[in-house]
Image (cartoon, coloured by chain):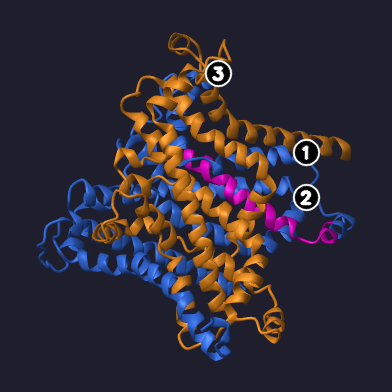
Chain colours: A blue, B orange
Amino acid sequence: MKFSNLSYANQRKFIIVGFSALPLLLLIVFSYLPVINMFKYSFTDWNGYSKHMDYIGFKNYTRIFTEPEYFSVFKVSLYYFFATFVQMGLALYFATILSFSVRFKNLFKGVLFFPYMLNGVAIGFIFLFFFRPDGTLDTLLHALGLGQYVQLWLGNPNIINYSLAGASVWRYMGFNFIIFLGAISSIDRDVYEAADIDGANRWHQFRHIILPSIQKIVQLNIILAISGAISAFDIPYIMVDGSNGSETFVIQTINLAFKYSKLGLASALAVVLLFIVILVTLLQRTLIKEDR
Amino acid sequence: MHTLKYSTMSFLKYASLILGALAALLPIIVVFFASFKTKQEYAATSPLMPPTNWFNFSNYTKAFVDGKMLLGFGNTAFILVVSIVGATLLGSMIAFVLNRFKFRGSKLIMAAFLLATLIPSVTTQVATFQIVNALDLVNTRWAAIILYLGTDIIAVYIFLQFLDSISTALDESAMLDGASYFTIYWKIILPLLKPAIVTVIIVKGVNIYNDFYTPFLYMPKSGLQVISTALFKFKGPYGSQWEVICAGIMIAIIPTLIIFLILQKYIYNGFTNGSVK
């Protein structure tokens, strides 16, 4: 019997079940089950491979909050968090100027966006090369007569997080830039003309026309960037393996789980991280809703 | 007075753009320079100096052969194609059901997909690994494929959004002609979703090609290396041979550059459409 001979009511049932089964299964197994399991593991002392695990109550959590070594890595996230705002500022600035008539517009657009397209490991290595002693940055500073500012960019624990956060801005700025550019280009051109006639300068136009129109998108990007900052992993791991005080929350969690076989403790850390990310996102979303 | 102010503004505008462009390009250009230098030349010259011989491809050969980059490209291509085809089919199927039919539980399913976007997958790896391990998929290419299908819901999102703009009148007129729901999906909806599919290909393609931790964590076996992990391996043994590493970096970047130059317009649109939630 052919599918098309069934009544539409029966076809509907078939399609609903047939088309949702696999996507739903994948969603449950790979998005929700890990979260549930993670909660479960976080109350155990499991090492990740033995058949045996003991429930130890809130011990992992008290450890995280009482032993400063576990939570202190969280302050590394603050560097990425603040870098996010630099990133947004630059993206907004370049998106705004490139929305108006500029020579070589497409060239600038392409060049500013291109870093975002690159492979994560390639970016890590590019910046290892950039920051290494007598590398690109040092040579550049010497050439500009700023030799006295040369630092051990990745060797000095007081500086390394600025360097890494800088690399992160370089990597992700283009993404925000292209999104903002798209949002600005959807603003009706006539509005600027009217503003021009009223004698508004570029700053007024930015403040009173562009910013209000793309506010929602800017806020959304800030949320994304913040949860990205909190879960920073790629750049510090690829470049320096989290050494020299650059260990982030996620690096610590992954190391505890897979290197030191403390899966229970790592799960508790991951639960805390997940809570923080969800909290930040929900907080931002409610703030945005109130604004509207 | 006004023109003076105007030209200063204009000067500052171009100066900032050139500075921005230099900041974006310089880190890559110096790597490009170094990739053509010989060992002695690399040691003796400043990173900002172009190489003397632009046709010295020995670093590239070394990186490509010793780094087994071909293997990396092969694995990446396989994972990329299967994941994208899978995400397109599964994503459009579930989006079709959720957009076209209202049934008991449809709101719940919709909410489940939207809520999942809140979970950054890097935070749940600790437990995801155990599941992939229990399924016996660790150290197979299917580990990466199934994770790209199961945890990155962006495709569902994009299709849902796009389906809103495809009128149900089309479905209805096809039904008058006796078309089955499956025919409607396959012959009408899927072809109309083409722009959304392009967006999915671009957004997922870039994510998968550039992803590091999934292959690193789930496919450590050296025969399964992808571009990211192949490049990462240069870190230990080539630690002091930066000219070879630089060639490796360029090998990973060149495909991206070519795709970017050819598909620029689609890529901008892809990311702009893919992000509006």
Residue segment shown in magenta: A166-192
Decide whether residue A87 is among the magenta residues: no
Residue A191: x %, y % from top left: 83, 61
Q: Residue furthest front?
A: A1
Residue B1 appears in the figure: no
Where does the N terminus of chain B fall, quadrant-wise? Answer: top right
Q: Nearer the viewer, residue B209 or B72?
A: B72
Instruction: Name the subunit of mark 3.
Output: B
Residue A209 appears in the figure: yes
Decide whether residue A173 is among the magenta residues: yes
Q: Nearer the viewer, residue A238 or A145?
A: A238
Which numbered tag is attached to residue B48?
3
Label 1 SS = helix
Q: Amino acid at mark 2?
A: Arg
Q: Amino acid at mark 3?
A: Leu
Residue A273: x %, y % from top left: 33, 59
Which numbered tag is attached to residue B68?
none
Q: Is residue A257 left or right of residue A274?
A: left
Label 2 SS = helix
Residue A158's quadrant in the figure? top left
Q: Amino acid at mark 1?
A: Met
Q: Are marks 3 and 2 on the same chain?
A: no
Instruction: Name the subunit of mark 1.
Output: B
Label 3 SS = loop
Q: Is residue A158 left or right of residue A220?
A: left
Where does the C terminus of chain B fall, quadrant-wise? Answer: bottom right
Q: Kindly identify which residue carries mark 1.
A: B9
Q: Kindly identify which residue carries mark 2.
A: A202
Query: Contact, CB < 8 Å: mark 2 with mark 1?
Result: yes
